[in-house]
Image: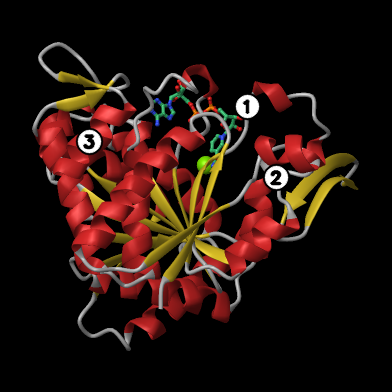
Amino acid sequence: MAKKIVVIPGDGIGKEITDSAVEVLKKAAEKYSLELEYEYKDAGGTAYDKFGTPLPEDTLEACKAADGVLFGAVGGDKWDNVEPSLRPEKAILGLRKGLGLYANLRPVKVADSLTEYSPLKPELVKGVDLVIVRELVGGIYFGDKCESEEFNGTERAWDLENYSIPEVERIAKLAFETARLRRGKVTSVDKANVLATSRLWRRTVAEVAKDYDDVELNNLYVDNTAMQLAVRPTQFDVIVTGNLFGDILSDEAAVIGGSIGMMPSASIGECTSLYEPIHGSAPDIAGKGIANPIGTILSAAMLLRYSLQEEAAAKAIEDAVDAALAEGWRTADLWHEGFKKANTEDMTRAVLAH
Ligand code: NAI
Ligand code: MG
């Protein structure tokens, strides 16, 4: 039976980059005899303009019934004055909630031909190939909070961090499964020297590890991890961590790769998972046909890997991207003297050719 992919182009460069990724998916499907069906749905400002809501019920229902969702980006100045609860970005929060997206996976892989774009020294980033698995629906972002209360004659605010064993088990299993598809190494990141939640986290991850003899587990404090990412990022394979630490570390790790236009992500859900580049809708370059489509193409590869279990097709897309880059193709965000200038379509062709 054909697998169904819901495509949500969204706003700004969303249409250009999802068009590119769907072309690559179609080519991969042809080569690997996959039956894929595409259903297009609205979200974000585009949906607000048509239906008065950034996330129509019909879009959410289609996502729930799909095998995977490919998402472009939402947002833009045009909707700056829209009431906060109806802003385009609310579509993402609605999808996270509606699909139960409990984990965010952000791979950072630096192709040999791209080491010069990293703010770190090329010799430090050569060979970087890691993925951060961040818990997305628990921890301090979703705990009880107090905006303001009187305390000892002054004012204070607080946010409560809490994690339950099932919440940690679920994300830990995903990290170990991910490591199995990679180099078999998990680094669990916490602050167990001072936080009770971190001690429960560490204990639970160690329990889950017993079912994965083939995967190596290390524990690292978050402050040390932040430092290690900058001094020796090649040591990491899979990093698993809570919501707050993951938010911070995944942005730090993303810059190691050099360009925001290259980075894919997966949000793993209870029913359907969602795949999107980490960048936004880039209103400054929308409609010009010059956006870098690689972050979205690599997100489509992740969809094949994690939602359809089509590892060979996923790997073929990633290799094709590496080959196009090694050939010297660069979109405007990465181009400099000596390289082949590519617009979105040229880059897509270059990937398709491989
Ligand atoms: P942005 O990521 O859209 O753009 C930042 C800069 O990077 C811009 O100069 C842009 O041209 C460039 N850029 C981004 N993606 C690129 C690509 N594929 N190729 C070449 N250049 C690229 O972030 P910004 O400007 O902060 O946000 C713009 C809008 O996107 C806002 O409305 C924001 O809320 C929304 N946004 C949406 C996200 C999503 O849909 N998941 C995530 C982040 C922001
Ligand atoms: Mg962040």
Label 2 element class: helix
Instruction: Please tell me how many numbered marks the rendered image carries.
Output: 3
Q: Is mark 1 within 8 Å of ligand 1?
A: yes
Residue 348 shows in this picture: yes
Q: Is residue 69 above or below residue 23?
A: below
Query: In which quadrant is the C terminus drawn?
Result: top left
Label 1 element class: loop
Find disc 1 in the rendering and name its residue.
Answer: 76
- Residue at the image position 41 percent from the left and 51 percent from the top: 265
Extreme residue in the bottom direction: 211
Expressed as whole percent of the image width and height from the top left, the position of residue 299 reads 37, 51
- Residue at the image position 48 percent from the left and 30 percent from the top: 13
Find disc 3 in the rendering and name its residue.
Answer: 349
Query: As shown in the figure, which amino acid type bears the numbered disc 2?
Result: Lys
- Estimate the spatial distance between the alpha carbons at disc 3 and disc 1, rounded to whole Å: 28 Å
- Estimate the spatial distance between the alpha carbons at disc 3 and disc 2, rounded to whole Å: 34 Å
Q: Is residue 65 above or below residue 140?
A: below
